[in-house]
């Protein structure tokens, strides 16, 4: 195993009857990065997290967490990895203070140190006023914050979060995202499963898009956006009606996927890597003595990337 | 931090859930004390022997049974509410998790039975207080053994309300087919002979006879013996370990209970 790899899966498969929730997955997570698993419901994200946290046992294949095999060395894996479940886990009558205190205790914190960490974590996640409420009396958002907070009590080497901000308000989302980044900055490797594109965009060092239990693509955001053919849209306006020569000339600029004439003086070009395409286009229009009055560039959003890789649709534009 | 420490922490938090259900606890104690004082004392004048002396130990063991059996309810809740999945992510071995639940049942049974023993002491002083202390380890093993029966229920009642139906059935059978309420001579008049062996070796009968013999000095027939109690409890405990191992392994393999 490479030294900079924290988590690696080898043909990891989890089947329920004839259904493969996870299908021959081969994935690597680098040490110290935030990898976001992005995929539609049922794509296998939660199953993968449960396998890594040893809640589930693979049907075939295996995975390693910091070099420990999830099947053969599951206890070592549990000492290394921590999971924040999608649904908060706690007995209804237990209170947040006791839930975190128990969690801290099992991970070896004792006495004053334990008390200090638990108090700080409760305050950091805005749970201090609710610390003596029973679990069943917490709101959905409070329950979710408590679930996430568990991992900040013992700060595992590998922390996995399943939809960490579901049910949490906007302010809370930002707070949790920043704390997850802080955990990464402190040295933990983070895996986040979500189907919320904004969360992925905010958190990810790399994004792994999953579909039907398989990894479709894993890249950083920039590369993912660039990977969509014709994903960048450049709108060009001319001072005079664009000639047929200009239109056909632009169509021949390397990186052009499609050109649509919007009006006599405006066109829209769907291109790859607009930063490379634009200088070449400008040289061309100058050669043809056309005068450009405005240029507007927009790149594909992560929604576009997500739909491109997970749906049966290409990049959709309202006017494309 | 050792596996034993972690196991004890889980056992403690599991046990605390029993004592957090205050109203359930109050109802149980209320029922047991009502049995002991009302039934025991009222029937005292109606029976041919001192019924309270006979019945109070039976009620204490019934309380021990209910308290240790409650681990099955807690595990069932844990399985349905996902807490067991959380436990499976903690740095404790599968055997540690299983033993934690059974230990919590053992402690729960002894503590609860201890409360009833204190209440009974107001009316039925123990023969020698030290004898009660001597009996505690045996009651602890008995309590863990009884939890083994609850584990078997957890194994077979996968979801929904079935657990409660099975639990009620087992409780009714174990309490009815025992010498808790009546001596073996009386029971033998009402049950076929093949059931009498079960009545005699029923862990509840064993526990009640242990209390009558050792603590209160009111032995009935058959006279209790420690090895039988220990052996029965140990066998049930082993069954409990196997059952809970199977329950959690199944959860890990199939993702559901």
Image (cartoon, grey):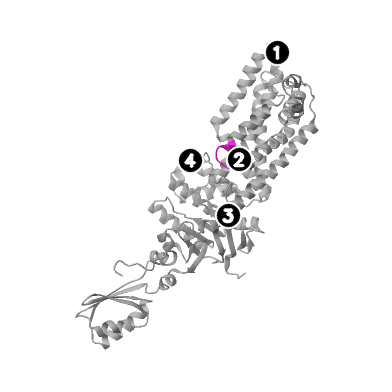
To the question of a shared chain for discs 2 and 4, the answer is no
Q: Nearer the viewer, mark 3 or mark 2?
A: 3
Among the two numbered marks 4 and 3 on one chain, the one whose residue lies closer to the N terminus: 3
Q: Looking at the rendered structure, which numbered label has been put on residue B47? A: 1
Q: Distance of mark 3 from mark 2, alpha carbons? A: 21 Å
Among the two numbered marks 1 and 2 on one chain, the one whose residue lies closer to the N terminus: 1
Q: Nearer the viewer, mark 2 or mark 4?
A: 2
Tell me which chain the residue with mark 2 is part of.
B
Q: Distance of mark 4 from mark 3, alpha carbons? A: 34 Å
* Residue under pointer 3: A17
Q: Are marks 2 and 4 in contact (CB under 8 Å)?
A: no
Q: Is residue A221 visible?
A: yes
* Residue under pointer 4: A136
Q: Distance of mark 3 from mark 1, alpha carbons? A: 61 Å
Magenta highlight on residue B161: yes
* Residue under pointer 2: B157
Q: Distance of mark 1 from mark 4, alpha carbons? A: 49 Å
Q: Are marks 4 and 3 in contact (CB under 8 Å)?
A: no
How dense is the environment of label 2, judged by Cα within 10 Å: few (below 14), some, or many (20 and up)? some
Q: Nearer the viewer, mark 1 or mark 4?
A: 1
Element type where label 3 sits in the image: loop
Element type where label 4 sits in the image: helix
Q: Which residues are magenta?
A: B159-163
Q: Is residue A12 left or right of residue B132?
A: left
Q: Looking at the rendered structure, which numbered label has been put on residue A128? A: none
How dense is the environment of label 4, judged by Cα within 10 Å: few (below 14), some, or many (20 and up)? some
């Amino acid at each position: 195993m490479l030294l900079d790899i924290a988590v690696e899966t080898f043909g990891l498969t989890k089947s329920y009857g004839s259904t493969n929730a996870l299908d021959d997955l081969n994935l690597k997570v680098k040490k110290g990065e935030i990898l976001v698993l992005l995929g539609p419901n049922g794509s296998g994200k939660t199953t993968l997290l449960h396998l890594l946290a040893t809640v589930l046992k693979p049907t075939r294949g295996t995975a390693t967490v910091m070099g420990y095999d999830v099947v053969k060395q599951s206890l070592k894996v549990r000492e290394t990895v921590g999971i924040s479940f999608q649904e908060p886990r706690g007995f209804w009558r237990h209170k947040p203070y006791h839930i975190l205190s128990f969690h801290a205790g099992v991970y070896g914190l004792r006495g004053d140190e334990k008390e200090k960490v638990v108090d700080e974590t409760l305050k950091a996640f805005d749970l201090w006023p609710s610390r003596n409420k029973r679990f069943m009396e917490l709101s959905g958002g409070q329950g979710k914050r408590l679930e996430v907070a568990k991992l900040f009590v013992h700060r595992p080497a590998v922390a996995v979060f399943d939809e960490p901000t579901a049910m949490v308000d906007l302010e809370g989302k930002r707070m949790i995202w920043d704390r997850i980044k802080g955990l990464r900055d402190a040295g933990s490797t983070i895996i986040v499963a979500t189907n919320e594109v904004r969360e992925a965009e905010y958190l990810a060092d790399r994004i792994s898009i999953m579909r039907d239990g398989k990894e479709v693509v894993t890249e950083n955001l920039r590369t993912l956006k660039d990977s969509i053919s014709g994903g960048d849209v450049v709108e060009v306006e001319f001072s005079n009606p664009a000639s047929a020569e200009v239109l056909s000339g632009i169509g021949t600029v390397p990186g052009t996927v499609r050109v649509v004439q919007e009006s006599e003086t405006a066109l829209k070009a769907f291109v790859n890597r607009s930063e490379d395409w634009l200088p070449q286009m400008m040289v061309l229009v100058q050669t043809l003595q056309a005068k450009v009055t405005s240029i507007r560039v927009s790149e594909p959003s992560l929604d576009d990337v997500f739909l491109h890789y997970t749906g049966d649709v290409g990049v959709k534009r309202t006017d494309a | 931090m050792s596996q034993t420490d972690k196991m004890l922490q889980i056992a403690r938090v599991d046990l605390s859930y029993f004592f957090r259900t205050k109203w359930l606890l109050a109802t149980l104690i209320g029922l047991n004390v009502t049995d002991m004082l009302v039934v025991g004392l009222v029937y005292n004048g109606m029976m041919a022997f001192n019924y309270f002396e006979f019945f109070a130990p039976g009620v204490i063991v019934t309380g021990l049974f209910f308290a240790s059996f409650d681990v099955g309810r807690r595990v069932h809740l844990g399985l349905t509410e996902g807490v067991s999945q959380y436990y499976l992510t903690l740095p404790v071995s599968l055997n540690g998790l299983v033993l934690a639940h059974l230990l919590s049942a053992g402690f729960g049974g002894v503590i609860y039975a201890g409360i009833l023993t204190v209440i009974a002491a107001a009316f039925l002083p123990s023969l020698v207080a030290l004898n009660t202390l001597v009996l505690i380890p045996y009651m602890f093993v008995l309590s863990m053994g009884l939890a083994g029966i609850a584990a078997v229920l957890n194994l077979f009642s996968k979801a929904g309300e079935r657990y409660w139906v099975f639990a009620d059935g087992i409780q009714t059978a174990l309490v009815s087919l025992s010498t808790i309420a009546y001596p073996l001579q009386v029971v033998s008049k009402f049950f076929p002979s093949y059931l009498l062996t079960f009545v005699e070796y029923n862990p509840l009968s064993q526990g009640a006879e242990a209390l009558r013999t050792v603590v209160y000095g009111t032995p009935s027939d058959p006279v209790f013996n420690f090895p039988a109690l220990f052996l029965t409890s140990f066998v049930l405990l082993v069954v409990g370990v196997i059952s809970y191992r199977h329950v959690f392994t199944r959860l890990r393999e199939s993702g559901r209970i």
